[in-house]
Image (cartoon, rainbow, N blue to C red):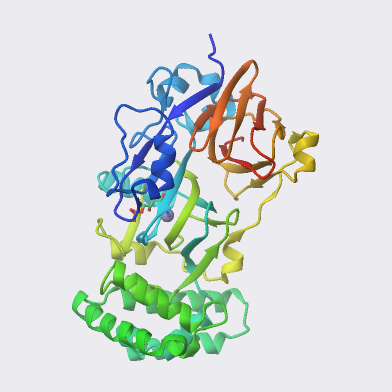
Amino acid sequence: MLPNPLIRLQCGVNSYDWGKIGSESAAARFAAATPSETLSIQSDKPYAELWMGTHPSNPSKDLATGRTLLELVEGNRMLLAPSVQAKYGSKLPFLFKVLSINKALSIQAHPNKKLAEQLHARDPKNYPDDNHKPEMAIAITNFEGLCGFRPLGEIAHFLSSVPALRELVGEDEGKSFIATVRGQEGDESSESTTQNKRALQSAFAALMKSSQEDVAKAAKALVADAEKRGEEFADGGIESTSGATMSELVVRLNQQFPDDIGLFVLFFLNYVQLTPGEAMFLQADDIHAYISGDIIECMAASDNVVRAGFTPKFKDVQRLVDLLTYNYAPIEEQKMTPTEYPYVVLNRAAYSSGSHVLLYDPPIEEFSVLRTVLKGNAAKATFDPVDGPSIVICTGGKGKISVGPKVEEVKEGYVFFVGSTAELILESEGGPDDEFTTFKAFCEI
Ligand SMILES: NNC(=O)[C@@H](O)[C@H](O)[C@H](O)COP(=O)(O)O
Ligand SMILES: [Zn+2]
């Protein structure tokens, strides 16, 4: 007998070094919102990631029975939808997370599918999955991150204006990069792009192969330069990131990771700030490092990370240098623009209070995410059934969730699995200024 496809989940939280501390961490607060014999939030411990899904490294459980979600969907394939189950088996195609970031994550990229299979076969301890890990971040609070390579003219500016950076990259390498970029200026041809990517890889590789001794020496000079020159640092910076911002970032990140190579990678990557509801998408092999804030993160089901800086974890620097796409673009091109979701009906209370449902739909099939904000009381959203599995988390406010005859109360941190083809209703229960906010990850192919 098919269980009612509305299942309250108990989800685990990972304590990585960079997580926010104790109840400061949204990941910890959300995990603690659901009864658990094992979890009690320690006030001095970092809590980084709440995991929602079937990934074996931290499997979510059915709160009522204690069975893992994987066991449930394996026992009732209809919960997944035949199309999804045929392609992805009985595991969810996506891994859904809340990250709560107190200090920078590693300078990292996630290997594409082919490389993931090779790395997993060779080194399953450091590469636990044979799957790619494209990922999307949606800001819950204000967020900062490094995402993708900057436009090359910006990197050329920093190579010209930051002596410590030029020192590590090397005088000749720096000059050659600047000459190539200047020579190709305005040329959008594929030949020019290929030459630019080659120059970028050469300069980045030169930086990344620096010895720790050289990095430590250059880092001290860099921080002294940043502290002394403030707004004038890096000749006042560039349009997207002022000298003052670069100076502050160098000093702050050096406090987090003293004398780290990541301080210099900063000048190669776009510095991005997201406000709540803004999002960005990272393909496999795209370089990034998140810096601060609370986010929803959704990814293909994998935990493969290739790291090269800003981390005490296993680093695979040459692997990262070799696998990167070396795509470069202004940060605005990295951001994702959500769209109004058409397959939902809002009631009058929802319309009149300005409630909305936004769809974040990246160019891959494993997942999309809905962000629903129901304002005031009795604002209701009725969603068409989805032909695939969904996971819903509440990140603020309170209300009700119902599927067929089953109705559950919802508070901040509550997580639910919703099986395929279930008509879902969300309804707010709050004062006129309250917002009942939920995020729903789903796969429909
Ligand atoms: N960009 N965000 C992610 O990829 C998260 O889902 C991963 O879990 C993070 O890479 C974890 O960061 P560390 O490996 O601890 O540095
Ligand atoms: Zn990542």
Question: Residue 12 in the image: x percent, y percent?
Answer: 37, 36
Q: Residue at x 53, y 51 (%)?
A: 140
Q: Residue at x 60, y 57 (%)?
A: 278
To which quarter of the image does residue 418 belong? top right
Question: Residue 325 in the image: x percent, y percent?
Answer: 46, 64
- 238 vs 165, left or right, is right
- 345 vs 73, left or right, is right
Number of marks in the rendered image: 0
Front position in the image: 328 or 99: 99
Front position in the image: 191 or 265: 265
To which quarter of the image does residue 213 belong? bottom left
Residue 98 shows in the view: yes
Check the image and name the residue furthest to the front. Answer: 431
Check the image and name the residue furthest to the left. Answer: 213
Front position in the image: 384 or 78: 384
> Where 142 sits versus 170, above or below?
above
Residue 302 shows in the view: no
Q: Residue at x 29, y 61 (%)?
A: 311
Question: Residue 347 in the image: x percent, y percent?
Answer: 78, 33
Front position in the image: 404 or 94: 404
> Where 426 sits versus 329, above or below?
above
Check the image and name the residue furthest to the top. Answer: 1
Question: Residue 231 in the image: x percent, y percent?
Answer: 47, 86
> Where 405 sits versus 208, above or below?
above
Quarter in which the C terminus is drawn? top right
